[in-house]
Image (cartoon, helix red, strand yellow):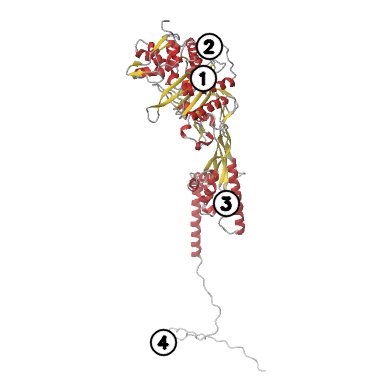
Amino acid sequence: MPSQEPPRRRVPKPARSGNDGRSRPASRPAARRPGPRGPRQIRLGSPRPRLRLVSLGLTLVMLVFVVRLLQVQAVDASAYAAKAEKSRYLSHTIAAERGKITDRSGIALATSVDAYDITADPSMFTADFTKVPDAPEQAAALLAPILGVDTEVIVKKLRTPDSPRYTVLSRRQTPQVWNQIKDLKRVLAEKASKASRAARGKAAGGTVSVLSGVLQETSSKRVYPNGDLAAGILGYVNAAGRGAGGVESMLDKQLAGEDGKVTYAQSGGRRVPTASSHETPAVPGSDIELTIDRDIQWAAQQAISEQVTESRADRGYVVVQNTRTGEVLAMANAPGFDPNDVSAANSAAMGNAALQDVYEPGSTSKVMSMAAVLEEKAATPGTHVVVPNRLHRGDRLFKDDIDHPTWNLTLNGVLAKSSNIGTILATGQLGKTQPEANKVLHSYLTKFGIGRPTGLGYPGETQGILAEPQDWSTSQQYTIPFGQGLSLNAMQAASVYSTIANGGVRIEPTLVRGTQGPDGRFTAAPAPKKTRVVSEQTARTLATMLESVVGNEEGTGTKAAIPGYRVAGKTGTANRVDPKLGVYKGYTASFAGFAPADDPQITVYCAIQNPTKGSYFGGQICGPIYKKVMEFALKTLQVEPTGSKPARLPVTFKPGE
């Protein structure tokens, strides 16, 4: 078997040299024949540019975050912290409990009971939160009839509130009202929960109750247990919880106390129990004890209300005062109002007319003229006064309330028969000339308190009208002595008679006995100011003369007599100035007096404005009121009859005696 030779190895041939001796290039290799192709290889570009771009983008994003972080945490840190705190924490006022107002025995006349302020978080009524576009309108339709507030008002408070997280829908609602709202919220929440389960977690409209943002704050509501009793004295409290009339306004600062404040964290309209909170407790108001006796106030109010209705009069008032202390035991007005429902009250009846009405008193004012005559020793009770049927003075012709032949009266008789002419003649003796007499009379009227504040400090009180003597017109010089041409209020008129009853010393009327603070300590009211007006002798003489008005058959006040008691009093029937027309139209009927006459303890004054049915004379329609109220007061205060006999001064004289 022939041996195989190994393959020959090709040796490349040396390049040929050209003619010029340089070597020639090697021949081009032969082209490859086409054959089957392998996988194609893709060559990637350099990744570095892309990495640089991504890095730059990330750097810019991080830079934005860093800048924003610096702004939030460094530059504007305090501002953002405050916004966060404001959003998370809510602050509410804690209303102080308003003090009570009681009568002299501690019986409540005005007090406060638990109530609720109905509030809302407006952010919980937005479409985003409730998934309901008209959530405020739906909530308002449900709440309006319960709260007694117009639907439009509630919608406005929910859509455009003063604060984005807090608004008050209604203040001082009863617990029953809040219970109604709670029941309604529960029913709506159950419906929303069922709707949410039916939707199986999908966003479905109505899955949040439209009342979920309605909340409450504990408050208090002012109530008056006796209804309209003493409403003119007490006044009332407005919607903001502040006194808006009477004692409620006069002593609002003491009654209101000091509100507190609570700040707490909240989420979703609910308080976060584990979060911190800060509370400044409220300081309760002081209790006010009045000088008023509730029972006497009731008797006075009943009597005057019945007579005003029977006489079809515009209004009337009764004032009862302790003659020895100046304390006001009753101050009744008719018509009145119920401070529990101010919205239903007649605005004309909401004040205290006994202090705020100004009117000409008429003949009840003659007691001041007689006091001046006696004190100046111009006459005595027995001085003879010849009273004609007509008297010409200045530019006028004066007369008494009835036509009569010439009367031969004593000074006591002038007062008993309430003679205008006799009073003009008596006061004319106060000076050598009429201007001098005017000055003397004016000084006494001023000391009795006419034209000056009573001293009560009551809001809206009138001080009456008394011109300076040099400004008195020709007719005023003669009408003022018998009570026309000057004006006063009912409290001033009562105070005049209390001054006589108190031995000639005027004690400023008082309405407040004292206050009891939150610490339980009682502080008595300051002692009232005292001023001597006439001597004790003059006062006793006047008291005796006033008995003739009631106890003498010729007197004008016989209907005021009280069996077993000596009564001093005076009737009044004055021409009345119509406040709308500014002219004399109608009458003011009045009666004033005190008892027992020989040991005075109680003063009662009554006046009725513009009686239009039946009699308009003070002795006829106010005398019986005086009797009812005085009898009740004497029994209530257990004042016993003195048992002494009246002096019975003469009323007339025989010519030549």
Upstream in sequence: badge 3 or badge 2: 3
Residue topped by disc 4: 19
Upstream in sequence: badge 4 or badge 1: 4
- Disc 3 on helix, strand or loop? loop
Is residue 482 shown left or right of residue 565? left
Upstream in sequence: badge 2 or badge 1: 1
Q: Looking at numbered disc 3 in the image, what kind of residue is underneath it?
A: Ser
Q: Looking at numbered disc 2 in the image, what kind of residue is underneath it?
A: Pro
Residue topped by disc 1: 560
- Disc 1 on helix, strand or loop? helix
> At 59% from the left edge and 20% from the top edge, which residue is drawn?
635
Q: Looking at numbered disc 4 in the image, what kind of residue is underneath it?
A: Asn
Residue 102 image offset from top left, x and y in percent: 57, 27
Residue 59 image offset from top left, x and y in percent: 50, 57
The relative height of residue 545 versus residue 98 in the rendered view (above or below) is above
The CA distance from mark 4 to mark 1 is 174 Å
Is disc 3 in contact with disc 2, using a CB cutoff of under 8 Å?
no
